[in-house]
Amino acid sequence: MVSEQRRLGPDAHDPTGWFDRLYAAAGDGDAVVPWDRGTPHPLVADWVQRCAGEGAGRRAMVVGAGPGYDAELLGARGFATVAFDVSPTAVAAARKRFGASPVRYVVADLLDLPAEWIEAYDLVVECLTVQSLPDPPRAQAIAQVGRLVARGGVLLVVAHGRPDGAPEPAGPPWPLTLGEVEAFAAAGLRVETLEWHEATQQTGPRWRAVLRR
């Protein structure tokens, strides 16, 4: 899977266009989207079940919607949910997959957010998106995510992790360091909880962070 991401992956002139190439290749049966597990990410689902509460009257945003399962989890809890992806192919596939869904799937670029989204969402979920970007523009993308969070709102971040000082892999993905996870607070948020989950047989070590404005 990692070699497939590298084959289709970003270059210095087009760091985000590879997402649509991957989704298009997957739609043709020529690739597999490695983060499409058919269900919400377990670390997202666990936190939402325990901590998110009911969504009625609250707005949620999913960054890098991908196949749409995290967004559908929030929509099912009553959040007025917007989920965006830079890949038009991914957005079209999610709309088709969840045709009767209340979730609004939108094509948008994290590096160029619509003005009306800034500080507009009570819950923002960023799961495995920025780790799929080289740096640059990964640091810029991290700074952008927090701008979506409303006053009193919460940002949930899930990412594969690497210890500070460990060599950066060729990527994608580029697992995040502690410093990169803490950098999500740059937009006026504060870190509320920060968890390190050890590697399992299925996946490498992961971060789960909760930040609040």
Image: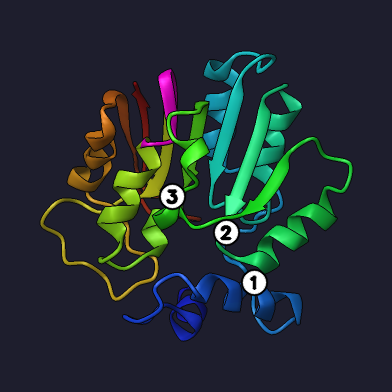
Over which residues does the magenta segment extend? 147-154
**x and y percent of residue 33 in the render?**
61, 68
- 21 versus 172 height, above or below: below
**Predominant secondary structure, magenta span:** strand
The image's mark for residue 200 is 3
**x and y percent of residue 90 in the render?**
67, 63
Q: Secondary structure at mark 3?
A: loop
For disc 2, the neighbor class at 10 Å (few under 14, some 14 to 19, many from 20) is some
The image's mark for residue 35 is 2
Q: Residue at x 72, y 38 (%)?
A: 72
Q: Residue at x 58, y 56 (%)?
A: 85
* Residue type, mark 2 in image: Trp
* Residue type, mark 3 in image: Thr
Residue annotated with mark 1: 23
Q: Secondary structure at mark 2?
A: loop
Say how the picture is coloured.
Answer: rainbow
Q: CA distance from mark 3 to mark 1?
A: 27 Å
* Residue type, mark 1 in image: Tyr
